[in-house]
Image: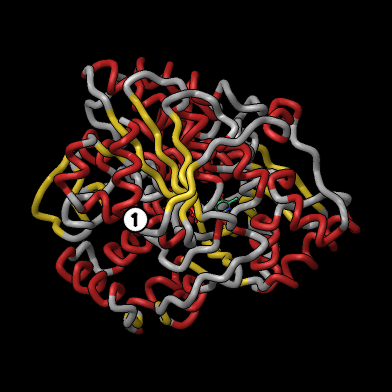
Amino acid sequence: MKYISTRNNKLEFEFRDVFIKGLADDGGLYVPKSLKKYGKEELLELKNLNYNELSIEIISQFLGDFISKEELSSLIKKSYSTFREKEVVKITYVGEIKLLELFHGPTLAFKDVAMQFIGNLYEYYLNKNDKKINIVVATSGDTGAAAIDAIKGKSNLNIFVLHPNNKISSVQRKIMTTVEDNNVFNIAIDGNFDDCQNIVKQMFSDLEFSKSINMSGVNSINWARIIAQAVYYFFSYFKLGKETISFSVPTGNFGDVFAGYIAKKMGLPIEKLIVATNENDILHRAISKGDYVSKEVKETLSPSMDIQLASNFERLIYYINNSDSEKTAEIMEKIKQNSYQIEKKHLDIIQKEFLSESCNEQETLDIIKKNYEENNVILDPHTAVGVGAAKKLSFNDCLVLSTAHPCKFPDATNKAINKHEKLPKELQHVLEKKENFQVLKNTTEEVKNFIKSKI
Ligand SMILES: *Cc1c(COP(=O)(O)O)cnc(C)c1O
């Protein structure tokens, strides 16, 4: 399998480049040159695979000769042995709503599904090639925790995590900052998530710096995350056993929902993907009326979606422009100047696949309250946005991705119902332990200097 950059489809790359670098040198995102498309018969053959078997099947379509099937198989087994659910994910029914619970991994959000796999994939690659890598990642709260858990204590790897200071929940922060392994570094940036993401992007595009520290990224632009996430779309489709399926996906960086789009491109009969946003609704405005102009980031009850620059959207732009990388590069330039309106013909293509809605703060609280009163179930605020969007669109039969455990967001659930869920006992210790993080100014220079001083 070969890959190209969304901004230049002339150069080809291997999975190794895509995985280790995350972002192409030209600033574009990697996408595969072609995709395996399963026919109906072939899909039937996958129907009875368990989660690990299905992961091996789907993920191996993308890895070329990076790893043998046997090694991939043991790596996946190891990755998902850390989950509290045997089948990794779980479908539950809450009144009329169907939820796909994705939060049974070690850090209680869906990010673990891809990140546990990625951590082991790094270890495999670095041991085999005797290399050292520094991972730098920006987080709106959950990616960082998942990445730290996946990387902590592994040899040949350091991880630096940038989170927006005081803008994530305290449980989210504590899960990250109480880890004691000496290859883990937490940085709190005086800014918002988009600032953190920008600093990481700038460090990547400073090739002298990024090469000098062997910098690697595990943000949701990393293709390896997308393919690991595509697996649960397949898995849940087979579990429900209907002809077609639709999903409502709480969205920030457009990573998770894009994985669903890839599953569809691979032949999974998905009818619609609902892009569910909080008040940071750029993706809803874009998909419903073509308005891709970013506004100030607002702090909401669902902080992991407080994003205005959805990095993975570039991949969709590439596909709706018929894999034209020059066109994509032009559009990305417009986005940089914050002046992109999606053309009507492209919007029509997008709306065939996607619907969108956004829920404001009050609506999110109301949904948490209603579900608690009617069904005695506490939803986390991100999941509540997914439920709310489906409801507003009267799309009752869809599967809502439940992206986080409610215990991670006690402030939100306290506000809605004056109750919060307890942390699972494996994680209770983070509430007591000493935290360790460095607050830095919102400049790339400061972060670079900090990293250099630590390695
Ligand atoms: C990251 C995250 C999201 C958004 O996922 P994207 O891939 O960035 O769209 C939604 N919910 C939770 C709980 C998250 O951690």
Q: Quadrant of residue 124?
A: top left
In this picture, residue 405 sits left or right of residue 26: right
In this picture, residue 403 sits left or right of residue 384: left
Q: Quadrant of residue 48?
A: top right
Please name the residue that numbered disc 1 is placed on: 199
Provide residue 122's location: percent of width, then percent of height: 34, 27
Q: Quadrant of residue 391?
A: bottom right
Q: Residue at position x 53%, y 34% from top?
A: 47
344 relative to 357, above or below: below
Provide residue 92's location: percent of width, then percent of height: 74, 43
Q: Residue furthest right?
A: 373
The kind of residue tagged 1 is: Ile
Task: Tell me the SS state at disc 1.
Answer: helix
In this picture, residue 387 sits left or right of residue 156: right
Provide residue 217's location: percent of width, then percent of height: 33, 42
Image quarter hosting the C terminus: top left
Q: Residue at position x 72%, y 35% from top?
A: 431
Image quarter hosting the N terminus: top left
Asked whether residue 139 appears in the rendered view, the answer is: no
239 relative to 99, above or below: above
128 relative to 239, above or below: above
Q: Residue at position x 48%, y 67% from top?
A: 354
Q: Residue furthest left?
A: 10
Q: Residue at position x 67%, y 55% from top?
A: 383
